Image (cartoon, grey):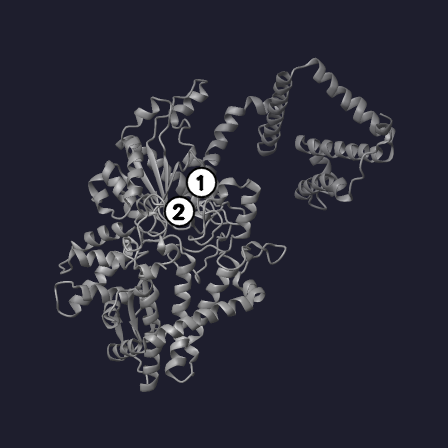
Amino acid sequence: MAEARKERRPHASLWDRIRILLFLGVVIFFFTWQDANPPFVTWGEAFSDFASSTFGIVLVVLAGLEVLRQVHYLVSELWSGYNYFWQHKVFGGTERTLHRNTSEWFRYRIRRLITLVFLILAYAVVAMVMRDDVSSISEAILKFPQVLGDVVPVVLQFMFFGALVMFQFVAIFWFLSRGGIDIVFPRDIETRFHDVKGQDHVLDLVKENIAFLEKPDEIEAKGGYIPGGILLWGPPGTGKTLMAEAIAGEVGKPYVFVDPGAFIQMFFGVGILKVKRLFKKLRKLSLQHGGVIVFFDEADSLGSRGGAGQSPGPFQPFDLPPHLACNAVGYMSEGTQAMLTDLYQDAQIDDGADRHDRRWPRMIMGAGMGGGGGMGTLQALLSEMSGLKKPRGLSNRMRRILGMKPKAPPKYRILIIMATNMPNSLDEAMLRPGRIDRIYKVGYPSKEGRKATFDLYLSKVSHSLTEEDVDRLSTVTPYYSGAKIKDVVNEGLIIAIRDDRETLTWEDIWRAKSLKELGPPEDAEYIERERHAVAIHEASHAVVAHLIMRHKSIDLATIERRGTTGGMVKPISLEDRFVLWKTEYETEIKTFLASLAGERMFFENDSSAGVSADLRAATQIVALMEGVYGMGEGVTSLMGLPQTSVWQTPDPTEKVVGRMADRIETRLREMYDEVWGLLDQNRDKVLAVADALEEHRTISGDMITEIMGSEPGSLISHTPTGFHNFERAGIDNGKSVDGKKGAKEPEEAGVPAQAEE
């Protein structure tokens, strides 16, 4: 209390002190200047006439009151006792008395009455100023109907022009909010589940959602709710859009396709209008047809707010290579998971990419206002996805006005399907249950899935491929999506038509596959000795790969130039594999080293710069094996050691080479010596493959097998070790590793006794 008695009012600036007086002075000067006409009407006479009018009296009184207010403030700024008296005794005491003796509702009604009186007085003052037949407040009130009748035409005129301007503005936004949304009705959808090949496991899960959409009462009667959102994520071309169309075709409901760029607009607010318009249409279609399916393609274009901090959710947690990841997160704390997610956030590797070279950034930066199609668009979408149960319509508004309870909203059967190949860029709020209830990965099809897909597209053309050819084709096309398979078949048909044939052959498919994977060859000729050197280089790769690669087979070898590549040997996986082992990495390294060994062997210890890419790949793999994969002498993973305090993790092979250069060189030298021995034993085979390459330029793996006279991987097929020795390790027929439970003898397992020793 003592401190309050010493408190003064804060000092006001000069502008705050004179601004209202200045405004009133300008108004008084204007009306005085309007009446003044010296020498007939002097300035004093004009001011007296204005001050004697009702409006003039009001302005003069207001100016006097403002002078008193500023004097009051000035004294309060200089005298603390005076300020205390008015703040705590007069105003504070009055407020305490009102709160003590009146209720909040009573004070609200008094404030409303004072506001009404003020509005009436304001109207009266304006009427006295604008009309000559009104000279007092009471007269202004009595003549209100007449005044209102005279004002209505003017008001309507202003309202018309305002409405015209508003209509133009609304029309522009209405026009901009259209487009990007297509509606396909059930009779126009011909796609069915049998048109989707290679994704049977996903279709089985999706059919459950369809059952809920067709018979929703069964689960709702038991206290559940209908899953209303599905996210299909996976690599491009795997059939996500086709699957959504098949769902719409199977259930016989309208199918609404939302273009990826539908919500990306030039002006703020248009995207929000589009979202509102879309869901209004969805609710209408749902009531008309008993349900509706809406499909958002490329959902990452509208489902990201941008910036960091997005957790990986149900997707691959630490962005490790697929063949390294396991369920290690199952026993980690949330803090540890978050730390490792940040640590590896820039190491994401695409499933179908080269697992040693192609790395994709995990951070998806938003454009403009943070992605999601513009400010507020994503928020509007999230609100509509979870806000479909709000009472809507004009009747409910009237019920609220009349104080009645709104009618319960109808049950809108809306199935939302989203597709994306960048799931980690989606906002967490979009993926929560209630918006997206089911998340399915639509990955690359398995061998059986690829075979079914080839059968589907080959059935639409005339071809001469046998069942064995199709099975072989499905084997040599790992990581092929449905779209890529369709493209290969179509390209093969184009090649056949170009050769004036109507029937597609195996040769056409093989050429089409090579063309799509490698690109067209350049029209460039080698000089004779360089052509022979390139052929020896690639033949060395091919011979070593044929002898020691059991998990892969050679698809083709070529010395035709494509881009910056002078030639290549292209192996393909024989099985759908998800984990690579130490012995398999070693075979790849030996295949890389074959080019250097072959050139030195056949060109008197001379070698070209063309081996640099092979040596780089071999060094990189050995570095990863030694310092990351646990395939060397130590067990430390240098990928787990941050380089800087901001947890940046570049390619870990840089650290490995710096710390383990001697071990890497020793290991590479040992494998190089083994490769030299292999090539020395098969000199004639290397020269035979090289001659075939010089003659045909591109040869198939079958031709290489014919030249070699043995099956692929023949060198290790009789002496399998490690992972490839699984039959002898006792996995087959329930045998144990130590040979118990009636383990077969080496001869019974199809392995010579000498090889066993």
Q: Quadrant of residue 100?
A: top right
Q: Of marks 1 and 2, which one's residue comes earlier in the chain?
A: 2
Closest to the observer: 144 or 310?
A: 310
- Amino acid residing under circle 2: Ala
Closest to the observer: 200 or 157?
A: 200
Q: Quadrant of residue 683?
A: bottom left
Question: Residue shown at 59%/55% (left/top)?
Answer: 642
Q: Quadrant of residue 488?
A: bottom left
Question: Residue shown at 24%/79% (left/top)?
Answer: 695
Left or right of 29 in this view: 109: left
Q: Split into 4 quadrants, where in the image is the C terminus?
A: bottom left
Closest to the observer: 560 or 466?
A: 466
Residue assigned mark 1: 430
Please count the marks in the image.
Answer: 2
Residue assigned mark 2: 299
Q: Residue 741 appears at what percent x and percent y?
A: 34, 43
| Dots 1, 2 in contact, CB < 8 A | yes
Structural distance between the alpha carbons of marks 1 and 2: 10 Å
Against 745, residue 407 (above or below) is: above
Q: Residue 405 appears at what percent x and percent y?
A: 43, 18
In terms of secondary structure, where does tag 1 sit?
helix
- Amino acid residing under circle 1: Met
Residue 236's tag is: none
Question: Residue shown at 32%/33% (left/top)?
Answer: 284
Outermost residue, bottom direction? 528
Q: Residue 467 appears at what percent x and percent y?
A: 16, 55
In terms of secondary structure, where does tag 2 sit?
helix
